Amino acid sequence: MLGGFTDVKVNGVRNDVVVYEAGLLLLADHSHSDPKRLRQVLEATPVRELLRRNRFVGFTDFTHARILKAGTPFKVAIDLAGGEQLEIAERWTSTSLGKDDGKLLQDLLGDLRNTGPMPDAAAAEAARTWAEDAVILDAMSNVKVNGIDYDLVILDIGLVFIADPGGFEHGRRRLAALVQTTAPHEIVGRNWLVRYEQVVDARITRSVPVTGELELYDGLRLAITEGRFIQSLTDDTRDVLRAALCSVGATIPI
């Protein structure tokens, strides 16, 4: 255990929250408690039993996190795989188990993917994307690029590949949550953008499922294949992806 808080609000409902290395434990049954009582519960109850009785949200399920209010009291917003959103708000009556637990949680969220500072090159790419007023055209989950799964976001300036996307079964909700809560320049800055201007050759080898190849100026070849199990942001995603590939020289096979 790294730390914890009593009587914070999670989506407006009072909970105790315990911070572990792997995620957050939400104890709705122990709301209105004090640090002494929470420590007694944690010491007297095996972790496995705590997980069975309460809700555990693993950091691997976080798709985006934002610190809405830093300091004390803090407020954070978290997007989860599957599209669910959590807002955790410390109250003036909340108490932390340790003196610096609020800072610990905020620092931890800042170190997670999509929340920490961008590297200089990524920040520059994000700034350029912002200046271009880039537009999201569509998105598709669980596309394979050189055999590796990515979520794909199709912009008017290029294709964004998002690594470690999660299961296909929540793909549409995951993509909808992403595009509704994250500006295009943020998506670009924290993921892999292939600009259309980087492409020297493009082919579509199969129209359905969409299968194609891009060759970039640096010699890198990207084999892009619509996954066996995918979900799309809209009903037109295949058409949008084919149009994007055609815009850099590909032709649709007859």
Image (tube, rainbow, N blue to C red):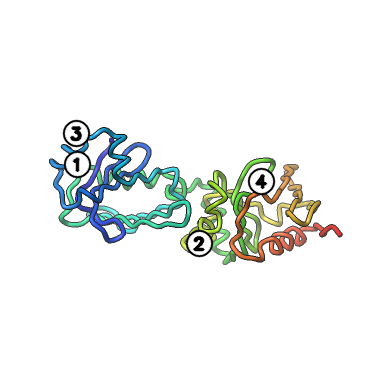
Q: Nearer the viewer, mark 2 or mark 3?
A: 3
User: Residue at horizontal 68%, vertical 40%?
Assistant: 147
- Residue picked out by circle 4: 144
**Earlier sequence position, callout 2 versus callout 1:** 1
* Pointer 1 residue: 97
**Total tally of numbered discs in the picture:** 4
Judged by depth in the image, the label closer to the viewer, 1 or 4, is 4
Q: Which mark is residue 107?
A: none
Which of the image's four quarters has the C terminus?
bottom right
Q: Where is residue 126 in the image (x, y as percent from the top left)?
A: 54, 56
Q: What element carries label 4?
A: strand
**Residue at 33% over, 44% down:** 24
Task: Provide residue 117's location: percent of width, then percent of height.
Answer: 44, 48
Residue drawn at the location 55% of the way across and 58% of the way down: 172
Instruction: Examine the image and state in which quarter residue 73 appears.
Output: bottom left
Measured Cα–Cα span from mark 2 to mark 3: 45 Å
Give the number of the mark in front: 4 or 2: 4
Q: Is mark 3 on a helix, strand or loop?
A: helix
Pick the front one: 44 or 65: 44
